Amino acid sequence: MISLYDDCLKPLFSTLESNTDQLSSITAMTDGLNEWLLMYFTKVNCSIYGTVTYPSGATATLGTPATPLKICKPIFTTFMLTVPEVLDAVSIPVGGLVNLFDYIGRKISGQILTWTAAPIIPGIATCSMITSHFKVIAADMMLELQQINLDPEVNENPTKEIWDIIERRLDSAIKMCSTIPTPYIGAFGPGVFNGIAELNLNPEGI
């Protein structure tokens, strides 16, 4: 997995002038977060299992709850954090990072809505992730961030330490989205597949 700070944010932050305005900083942060999130979603492979019914009436099992096929992926082509929305999320007197997490969670639940096991089993399952816990995780994260020593003589790179904690907490929040068993109907050769997709956003599975 790529690093949010080292691979996505640091290269963008390094292009900013020292006297850059807030909009430029938020734009860089938004672009970096989008890059990290989209790469994250490519790693997700959810379980799917069910039966195939052929035109002859014969049926066959394709995966089981104990041995599912790990081939169902979220369709995230429309997912995108936007600069105006990120700016609005963080531009509050207190709790900007908590609000940012809540915003990311709401974007996930509102835009990651369909999963597919194509090309093996063309079809889709529709489901919205539950992300109400993002804000709670972010609030707990703030307590951890308060422990960081910002003294440059003690901490060589506090910016990296801050973003590494944010990445770890965001990764945890996404993985904690509850698994939702969802009906999946699709094609399998000349037959029709009827089964269950166990949908979540955890690259490591359930």
Image (cartoon, grey):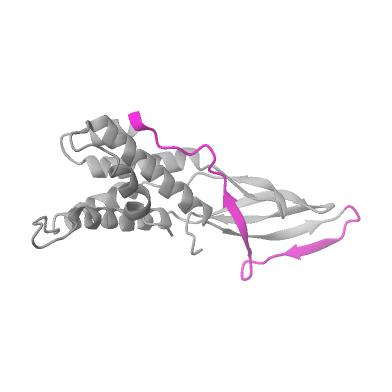
Q: Main secondary structure of the magenta part?
A: loop
* In front of the other: 22 or 136: 22
Question: Residue 148, position in %: x, y?
Answer: 14, 58
Residue at 47%, 51% in the rendered image? 39
* In front of the other: 165 or 65: 165
* In front of the other: 127 or 204: 204
Residue at 49%, 51% in the rendered image? 41
On screen, residue 52 versus residue 116, left or right, reads right
Question: Residue 136, position in %: x, y?
Answer: 28, 50
Residue 121, relative to residue 17: is it above or below? below
* In front of the other: 77 or 159: 159
> In what quadrant of the picture does the N terminus appear?
bottom left
Taking the image as drawn, is residue 146 in sight? Answer: yes
Residue at 28%, 44% in the rendered image? 14
- Which segment did they paint magenta? 55-84
Residue 61, relative to residue 183: is it above or below? below
- In the image, residue 76 lies in the stretch drawn in magenta: yes
Residue 120, relative to residue 22: is it above or below? below
Question: Residue 153, position in %: x, y?
Answer: 8, 61
Question: Residue 170, position in %: x, y?
Answer: 34, 53
Residue at 49%, 56% in the rendered image? 179
- In the image, residue 167 lies in the stretch drawn in magenta: no
On screen, residue 171 versus residue 26, left or right, reads right
Where on the picture, by quarter, is residue 181? bottom right
Residue 99, relative to residue 142: is it above or below? above
Name, please, the residue furthest toward the bottom. Answer: 66
